[in-house]
Image: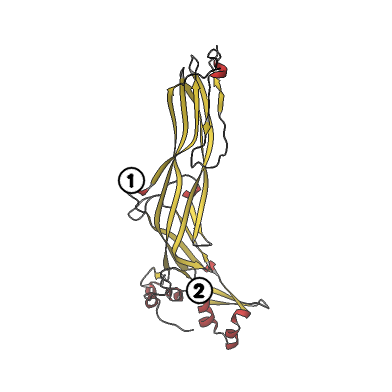
Amino acid sequence: MSCCGSPCSLLDKKGGNEGGVVEIERPLIEYAWSDVASPTIMDQLFRNSRYEFEVNWNYLNIVHEIKRFKRKKLSRDFPNNIIKRDLCLFKTDFTNRSNVTQNFTFKTERSTKTTASVNVQTGFQVGGNFNLEFSLPTVASEKIDAFKVTGGLSGQLSITKTRGKTYEESLVWSVDTQVRVSPNQKCCAKLIVCEEEFCADMIVRSTLKCIGDVLPVIVRHKKNRRQKVFEIPQERIPEILGKSGRFQLVDEDAEESGNYAVYCDSKGVFKAVYGAQQDITIDYVEAPPLQEGHDPENPVEEQVEAEHNVGVGAGPIIEEVLEDGQPLLPQP
């Protein structure tokens, strides 16, 4: 088995993939095939047609940790670099033209979508797929801004297929309350949600460490399915992955300590749009004059005029229950 140098010296060299995403399965297979298996000339010539290869990833432990999560600077108009906007999800008017105070039911449900997208710019892949899992930070520090949002986005996120992924969660906003309207007054009731949006630069550090002393690579014959296992010594893992220029040793004195773990920093951009707060606003104005044909002596039929609409930017309607036209009259 050949040796090209110590792990520390190899990790000081920069590869040509420093600026993008590197593949770690291929160099491990190449090392197992060329340096461990010692194939014959015929095996080398017919390698792709005769054999298939598989790295046993169960022998490699990968741990991910957020190292940086900082919101991008926007402008002076947005404190804490967060864009805030109010969305009117529901609006209704209650008009009381009677001589007594009336109670009306303001009840509705609306939904909005919380979206978050992650785009990875630099990092590593395993067999053409990403293997990146992380939890959004909930505690702030010097290099990390806290991220707190309702819904499933507060949990663990994972990227497995492509460089980017978008997550969506539906949030339901509801109101069920009584609105008192004085005689000859009009009430405008609104369900408003404060929506927040921000963009953050993030760095996720992935630490790779061999479980045990070796990393098995399986070589399988395509026709007879016979297979053989070749073992890569753990001290050679830093050497193999270090050629990409993306991995570095966790412990610089790996040869003395025996800790051959390596790490790779994946850099990306995180964007989120989510509902942060629900507000109910109720405004009173003087009731408009009656139109021709309305009977002021018949308040049960004429005292209520209700109209409602969905505000711009609102999410899809889940359920709508508006008890308009049925004022809760005091019992005689």
User: Is 196 situated left or right of 309 in this image?
Assistant: left
Element under disc 2: strand
CB within 8 Å, label 1 to label 2: no
Identify whether 197 is placed above or below 91.
below
Identify whether 174 is placed above or below 144.
above
Residue bearing mark 1:
77
- Residue 137, given in percent of the width and then of the height, sits at 41, 52
Question: What amino acid is at disc 2?
Answer: Val
Identify whether 325 is placed above or below 89.
above
Residue at (55% x, 19% y) in the render: 302
Of labels 1 and 2, earlier in sequence is 1
Which residue is more in the foreground, 248 or 320? 320
Label 1 packing within 10 angstroms: few (<14), some (14-19), many (20+): few
Q: What label does residue 173 carry, if any?
A: none
Q: What label does residue 214 carry, if any?
A: 2
Question: What amino acid is at disc 1?
Answer: Asp
- Residue 308, given in percent of the width and then of the height, sits at 52, 31
- Name of the residue lying farthest toward the right: 224
- Residue 227, given in percent of the width and then of the height, sits at 62, 77
- Residue 98, given in percent of the width and then of the height, sits at 50, 16
Which residue is more in the foreground, 228 or 247? 247
Residue at (51% x, 52% y) in the render: 167
| Closer to viewer: mark 1 or mark 2 | 1
